Amino acid sequence: MTAGDPLLTVEDLRTYIRTDGEPTRAVDGVSFDVERGETVCLVGESGSGKSVTCESLTGIVPQPPAEVVGGEITFDGTSLTDADDAQLRQVRGNRIAHVFQNPQGALDPVYSVGEQVVEAITVHDDVPERVARERGVELLREVGIPRASDRFDEYPHEFSGGMRQRVAIAIALAADPDLVVADEPTTAVDVTVQARLLDLLGDLTDDGTALLWVTHDLRVVAAVADRVLVMFGGTIVERGPVEAVFGAPGHPYTQALFDSYRGLSGRDEPTAREDIPTDGCRFRGQCPHAVLECGSDDQPSFYAVDERDDHTASCVYHDPGLEFDPEAVMADARGVRPDEGSADRPETGAGVRSEGSTGGHPDEGTGTRPEEGTDD
Amino acid sequence: MSPPDDSPRFEQVDWDEVDRSRSIATPERVTLLAGLILLAVLYWYDTAVAHVYLVGEWQVDRLDWALLLAGVVLVSYGLVPALRRIERVRAVLGRLRSRPGALAGSVYLLGLLVVGVVGPLVYADPGIQFQYAFNPPMGFATSVEFQECTGNVTGGVFNQTCHGSMTYPLGTNHRGFSMDYLVVTGARVAVYVLAITAAFVVPLAAIVGVVAGLRGGLVDDLLMGYVDLQLCLPAMVVYLVANTYWNTSLFVLLVTFGFLSWGGIARLVRSEVLQRREAGYVRVARGYGASWGRVARRHILPNVTNTLVPAVFQLLALLVLVEAGVAFLGFHDVQLYSWGSTISESLSAGVPAFEIWWVSTLPALALVATVLSLKLVGDGLRDTLDPRGGR
Amino acid sequence: MTDSDEPLLAVEDLETHYPVTRGLLRREVGRVRAVDGVSFELRRGETLGLVGESGCGKTTTALSVLDLEEPTGGEVRFDGEPVGDLSGEALSAFRRRAQLVVQDPNEAFNPRMTVGEAVAEPLAVHGVDDAERRRAVAADLLERVGLSADDADRYPHEFSGGEKQRIAIARALVLDPDLIVADEPTSALDGRVQADVLALLDDVRERFDVSVLFISHDIDVVRRFCDRVAVMYLGEIVEKGRVDDVFASPEHPYTRVLLGSVPSLDPGEGSLAEPLTDTVPDPSDPPSGCRFHTRCPEVIAPTDADLSEGVWRSLAAFRFTVRTGELPDPVGDPAVEESTVREAFDLPGSGGDGAVEFGDETVQQAVDEAVAALARGDRETADERLTDALTTPCETEVPAAVERDDRLVRCHRYDSGAAAEPLPWARSDE
């Protein structure tokens, strides 16, 4: 294991959930890396498999009914998929820590906050109580809890939602993990509280802790991510540095996601979950550009978008070997151009009622691709 | 062309035309009223003219009036609404069919109901026939001292063994009553317990629980304070005390135990109501004008069944056992041959009980089967009533 | 037909207070002022967004408007009639013309009723006795919101969150209402499903001429959906106006903090806005004067003090943090170095060496004394000293609501006799 290796490597992970009928393929062939110290965002809608992916990493996904049926997870050179329960418990909390969405649910109401932090410390580090307590108070300070030494002995219900989430983060950091896996940690709190939590997590990762952040909110991704992985139907459909993906999303699903942040979409009927295929490109049932080739293979390979090696999309249109013109797809790439200002400035009237708004006026710098007008 | 009056488009409902008057004469109320009138007539007839016979020789006494009243209540508020929502009932029954335990239990309980009501028609009181005491069931033999054996007699003069026969296929007890008669009368007693509790105790508990939960405030405090008080009274002691004032009877038993045990269920219902009172769909229903009464009936009570139904069946099972236990202890109506009393008497019959094992075992089996069925049906019903499948 | 100038919904000085009681006799020991003087209007076919964070009173306002929570003051007029006075037929008509959509789609439906029954029930409540007709209307409506008529016989748990919200909208429509109060209808949804449901609601609004009172904490959603917006904080409306105006050039400091707290879609550096203190005041004990003053980055400096803006801001943050008692560690421990206190609060300079850093002697002295008090562990004295020296006009007077051109803002900086001018605003990532 050399210093250059990624901290976490996930290869072709598959987690299926047993049901009365066909098992649900919650995670269906997901591969990605997380380097030391970087922040990677896993973004997707509910049902995309992002949470199950994270839970599968340390085996906290409830098995049964779920089951990791395939793939390799390697953390710091050691395989997690081959590890037994005892080894996994060593890793959990100690090297890989979890933060969950619901601040209420994450904390046990019958124990004081301090007791829970101390437990997180002593589970992995056999230190005397006094030392653990000192460290616990320090942790609470670090996450910005005022009067930490006083509040150490208070109970979760005496804290506000935002404070509870900070405590949850403190617990996650208790054993000084290398990787923090945060599943929608700011979804349940107010926007001003979220802003503080985003700042906090940004600070905390400055010291080299890697962060795998799961969210459905593209704005949060924009605020924290170094790299982004877009998930749909249990697969990753696009990946790359956040500026690249946000600047010019290459996969039709990512584009649709960005569009949903703009006007009010025009899908008259919701898509049933059963309509998502279990082979080929999972999005082809809803994609305006779908062709026959989209259905072949397990999933389309990843091809460079806009000739960037680090920004790839799992879409046949980007395959240089096939005759499809990537421009057909990229015409809908209404991402954000960093140097043209924020894309969410209200487009006069267009954002609310009109149909098929192709995104504002070039002179307002709303981030549409300049080549838009020349498409056919 | 103006759109037809029954157009399915919501914007074409003519609200000026729609009549909002509530109808007072719901089918349930009409049935209840009819039933009560019928009962009143019967009662008057019974007291003023001549005794009323229900089925065969079944003379109507206090307990039976209670049973009839229970029947009227259960029919108007149980059967009639079920018939009105026949589709839903069919779906529930269908789900029940796929649960073998609950299905077996329901079949047994239905059988129990039939046997308990109709049985006495078949079995008139045979009268005490001491000479036929202690005959064993068919296929078995006993060496117990007997006077007359209806089956074969084998063995020597001092060691006679009586074999069972077809006359008394389940054997006889110390009075010479056939066991099948005793099991049937025991069934009748069980039916009394179940029907009266189901018709009176359960609705009372549910209504109090709902009122306390929805009204809150002083009403809630008062009702629950009373329930707490009541729960402090040990029903057994009250029953024993009542025993000294009134003649020992099943009626007194049911009144004491029944009316002292509804408190627990009331509390259960109340806590469920408190939880669901703030639910989104309740709020929305109030928003579109549903009264609290409607909300309680349509939205809250049906969602309480997950806890209420098993608790009710638990209570029914408990009361069956209580009756048996009380009878077993000797505080029972000697005229009424419940399973418990049969077992009890077999133990003081002057002969070692294990030698006349059939006298205690058969009623005991009946008790076990009844309690087991009640539990199975209770759990099964809870699961089938919830469209989510018992989550 | 009503006069088209008359707003469909007029709310005036609405108050909904909850008493905090103690003891058997339920003595009132305090009041939670969930809604404290809210006024707005909603015209036919218009959408008004009520935006704010948790605890600001927006949900209580929505429920009070529908008379599902009883207001303790003020008036709600629907189509000219005061809602609180309604009874009998008139109340029934109101319950038909105003409908509620709730936030959590998982809680919005009775699990024991099929969705067809759920959508049809309002019809039954309002007298449509023909069960067949109810079924037909419900099935038709389900089709029109994007589901199928066969779905009417299925139970709520068989549908996804987005589908359930569609059904909730169908149910809200079935009585052909004039007003829909939507309490965070898309907060439990994400991505494209959220956009779909919003589009459906918008379509409904347009096609059936329904006004929508849209409660949300999500500014972005309000921006996309609403015509006008009212921003709420601690039970009051602090700013109100057309969505485009308010979000493009917000005036009230709270609105600015709110907008600035939402990360931009642009991954570029942009920093997020920060209120002065993080502690949200207790709704049963709101700050005096302008309720936002304890967290306001634009709080007005004391008139008699001579301080630069930057210095004043640090001092204000210092003062209000001390007031809440949520002291950053290690301040608050019995014995701490004064320098530690200064560092913790990022106070400019130290008066120890005689240098007057603040430009105002009285203030300097007060701050020094406060720091000393804190170093001793005496928060009360520190609070007193700071309050004496640093009283801001924002706390002594309640700001009046200033209205011009359909724009309202409740901030001292906009008062005509203001002690200070409004500050300019720009998004931090521009």
Image: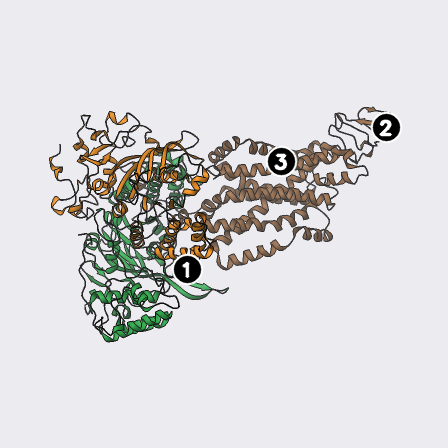
Chain colours: A orange, B brown, C green
Check disc 3: other Cα within 10 Å, few if <14, some if 14-19, many if 20+: some
| Callout 3 amino acid | Leu
B28, C232: nearer the viewer: C232
> Splitting the image into 4 quarters, where does residue B121 fall?
top right
C225, A34: nearer the viewer: A34
| Callout 2 amino acid | Asn
Residue B294, how many percent across, how many down?
A: 45, 47
Residue A218, how many percent across, how many down?
A: 26, 44
> Splitting the image into 4 quarters, where does residue B191 fall?
top right
Q: Which residue is mark 3?
A: B113
Q: Which residue is mark 2?
A: B159
Residue C232, how many percent across, how many down?
A: 29, 58
Task: From this view, report whether residue A300 is shown above or below residue C31.
Answer: above
Q: Residue at x 38, y 52 (%)?
A: A170
Position of residue B249 in the picture relative to residue A97 (left or right):
right
Check disc 1: other Cα within 10 Å, few if <14, some if 14-19, many if 20+: some
